[in-house]
Image: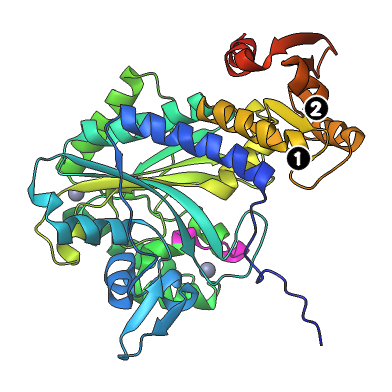
Amino acid sequence: MKYKFKAPRGTQDILPNKSEVLQKIERKIFEVAKCFGFLELRVPTFEHTELFMRSVGDSTDIVQKEMFTFEDRGGRSLSLRPEGTAGAVRAVVESGLINEALPLKVCYLLSCFRNERPQAGRLKEFHQFGFELFGASSPVADAEIISLINHLFEELGVLNLKLELNSIGCSNCRGEYINALVDYYSKYKNDLCETCLERLEKNPMRIIDCKNTNCKEISKNAPKILDYLCDECLDHFEAVKGFLTEQGVKFEINPYIVRGLDYYTRTVFEFTSTDLGAQSTVCGGGRYDGLTQIIGGKAVPALGCGIGIERLVLIMEAQKNSMMNFEKQCDIYIGNIGNSSVGLCNLLALKLRKAGLCVYTDLIGRSVKAQMKYADKIGAKYACIIGDLEIEQGKVLVKNMKDGDNFEVLIENFVDKVTLQLEV
Ligand SMILES: [Zn+2]
Ligand SMILES: [Zn+2]
């Protein structure tokens, strides 16, 4: 019996043409990150489950319902990372980087795993580009990271994004706000969804995030955190807005952004797009001053954000962004006639490849006609065919595949001449 395998639901293969495009985008992101001083951090795909319970929060949907959790042979519980921040914070605390020169800036590109029902732009394995900044409590750091994202989207040519900004206060001022929320939502106990009734007990702020139509309607008139901020939080928020305005970054205040995770404090923000139908978040983040301590490090203020790569790509596709065009790579196709020229073709190819050109040769013994057809198909910029006659005469005719022009090159000068021609 023959099996036919399919990729598991909620995963996707990135085929070569698409990955070329993705590499371009990813390189651009790393480039911009570096300009702002963010260097790459690489962390394992799975961590101890406890890390996510403590950081993401054990009352969140992510930890309660969506993690891929398994036991190792010693019976310890491990989980595939559902997001990037927890592992990054664990790594900088464990390595001691957080005790060295601050501020510390790291970024990462990684896959995350959530066992959710798959839907458009939402996969069980998805990719996140994250930025984390440690050791700066000043509002200028909040503004810098937001302005970095703003600049990055400009560089990528992503259009029509809206930046929404909020402050969710600190442990001093949030208590009073949460009491006000509990008072408010308690009046609607009969109309809230079941999950929100639980949230009312455990984490009422998360009711604001509920997608249920009834809950959404009720939340429209819920108390706003901005009315409850303490003086320090208010000053901080005002300063962030001031710096952003100074840098020409446009934003809107949305008092109902709370972000889904437990660890946020003060500034939270989202870049959203409506190009995929309903409004969707392409980048979200904020400050998480308490997190290093929660996972056993010293208290270091921190902030960060993550870009959903799949969403970003869908938006760029919808906007017909020119970066999404796949450019064919082959600089020159060096074909052969008969076996006697194969060695020379390969040697010339190797020399050109060493000079950085993309070269294709025949590896399967095709006829000359079939080779030229293939060269055309892969979009070779130039092509030539070398056989006994060319070897005897010491020269080759190189064809410009675009305009059909030919030029003759001595085999001994082949590498130099072709390299020169391709630089034009
Ligand atoms: Zn406060
Ligand atoms: Zn609800």
Left or right of 226 in this view: 372? right
Left or right of 304 in this view: 294? left
Q: Position of residue 136 (x, y in %)?
A: 16, 40
Q: Which residue is mark 1?
A: 362
Residue at the image position 36 percent from the left and 34 percent from the top: 33
Which dot, 1 or 2, sits closer to the camera?
Answer: 2
Left or right of 11 in this view: 90? left
Question: What span is in magenta?
Answer: 208-214
Q: Position of residue 277 (x, y in %)?
A: 69, 45
**SS assignment at label 1:** loop
Q: Which residue is mark 2?
A: 388
Which amino acid is tagged 1?
Asp
**SS assignment at label 2:** helix
Q: Is residue 64 above or below residue 374?
A: below
Q: Is residue 174 above or below residue 237?
A: below
Categorize mark 1 by other alpha carbons within 10 Å: few (<14), some (14-19), many (20+): many
Labelled disc at residue 116: none
